[in-house]
Amino acid sequence: MFKPSYLLFTLCLAFASFSAKAQMADRLSEHPTMGKQSADKAVTVTREMTNRLHLNEGQFLKLLPLNRTRLAGMNSIEQEYRNDAATRAAKAAELEAQFEQECSRILTPSQLSQLQQENEQPAAAPANTGNGLG
């Protein structure tokens, strides 16, 4: 009785693994510009976010396809508007706004706030001219 149930359990796990790999391949095929390097970069970016924002596994799994979409979109924008800096910047800002909106559905308010601060920090770093005493 133990062996058949163990075999059934093992087969179920194997099926789930193959199913997950097939779903991943389907997600990647949604982005024709998404190559192996870009897919790897999406994983790297999501792992970095996990470390910085202390994401749980569920959040990681939800953010990974968002990062893939964002990177593919950025690649597309860079190619399509390479000769038009103003339009390229506007489209990139629009894509980032969509990304943040999707993140707001996944991240906690404190995680989202931290992400927004990190995204704004390089562009608008405040000058520290005071001595910090008030």
Image: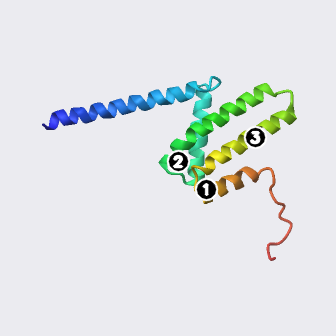
- Mark 2 or mark 1: name the one nearer the start of the chain: 2
Front-most of residues 129 and 31: 31
Q: Quadrant of residue 121?
A: bottom right
Q: Which residue is mark 3?
A: 94
Label 2 element class: helix
Q: Amino acid at mark 3?
A: Glu
Q: Position of residue 110 (x, y in %)?
A: 61, 60
Horizontal side of residue 34 vs 78, given as left or right: left
Q: Tell me the mark number nearer the camera, choosing from 3 and 1.
A: 3
Instruction: Residue 124: give x, y in percent of width and height.
Output: 81, 54
- Residue at 58 percent of width and 31 percent of height: 39
Q: Residue 28: x, y in percent?
A: 56, 27
Viewport quadrant of the C terminus:
bottom right
> How far apart are labels 3 and 2 at the CA level?
23 Å
Residue at numbered disc 1: 111
Secondary structure under badge 3? Answer: helix
Q: Residues within 10 Å of mark 2 (few under 14, many from 20)?
A: some
At label 2, the amino acid type is Gln
Alpha carbons under labels 2 and 1: distance apart: 11 Å
Calculate the distance from the C-alpha at mark 3 to the C-alpha at mark 1. Answer: 21 Å
For this orientation, the residue located farthest to the left is 1
Task: Give the farthest residue toward the bottom.
Answer: 133
Q: Are marks 2 and 1 in contact (CB under 8 Å)?
A: yes
Asked which secondary structure carries label 1, the reply is helix
Residue type (three-letter) at the residue carrying disc 1: Gln
Measuring 59% from the left and 26% from the top, which residue is drawn there?
A: 30
Which residue in the protein does label 2 denote?
A: 59
Q: Earlier in the sequence, mark 3 or mark 1?
A: 3
Instruction: Give the side of residue 120 with respect to residue 48, left or right.
Output: right
Quick check: 17 above or below 119?
A: above
The quadrant the N terminus occupies is top left
- First in sequence, mark 3 or 2: give its number: 2
